[in-house]
Image (cartoon, rainbow, N blue to C red):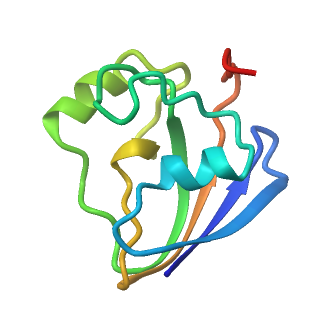
Amino acid sequence: MTLVRFLDSDGHMSAEVEVPAGEPVLKAAQNAGQPLEGTCEGQMACSTCHVLVMSVDGEAPAPPSEEEEDMLDFAYGATRQSRLSCQLMATEQLREIVLRMPGGSVDMSR
């Protein structure tokens, strides 16, 4: 299990969930009511699940693929810490990850 802590765009804790190994962080975020649309349902065809990785405890996630980096070019407020949460997988080696919602994110599914 990976402990995922979600921060809002102001840096305040908004949720904390345990995610089973092999599950994408996006699914856990949506189940925890986080403002991540995931419009493309994890197919890397949008950037509506953009998050900022603030810290990692344990083995860091694999670096973003070229396709993910291309999609992040469309993300609002992208930085070097930006990732698509649909591409971040919980693993047994990733004990904890802290993710912050970027400023200006809008969840149109609400």
Q: Residue furthest left?
A: 66
The C terminus, quarter of image: top right
Q: Residue at x 66, y 23 (%)?
A: 105
**For this view, does 38 lie left or right of residue 66?**
right
- Left-right relation of 45 to 56: left
> Residue 75 at what x, y percent from top left?
46, 21
Location of residue 61 with respect to 37 vertically, above or below? below
Image quadrant assignment for residue 45? top left
Q: Residue at x 68, y 22 (%)?
A: 107
Q: Residue at x 39, y 75 (%)?
A: 21
The front one of 74 and 90 is 90
Quarter of the image for residue 16 reads bottom right
The image shows residue 1 at horizontal and vertical percentages of 49, 81
In the rendered image, residue 99, in percent from the top left (x then y), is placed at 60, 54
- From what the image shows, is residue 55 above or below residue 30? below
Where residue 46 sits: x, y (%)?
A: 38, 20
Q: Nearer the viewer, residue 70 or 3?
A: 3
The mark tally for this picture is 0
Compared to residue 6, the image places residue 81 above or below, namely: above
Residue name at image x 69 percent, y 34 percent: 35
Residue 82 visible here: no
On screen, residue 59 versus residue 49, left or right, reads left
Question: Is 48 positioned to the left or the right of 100 in the image?
Answer: left
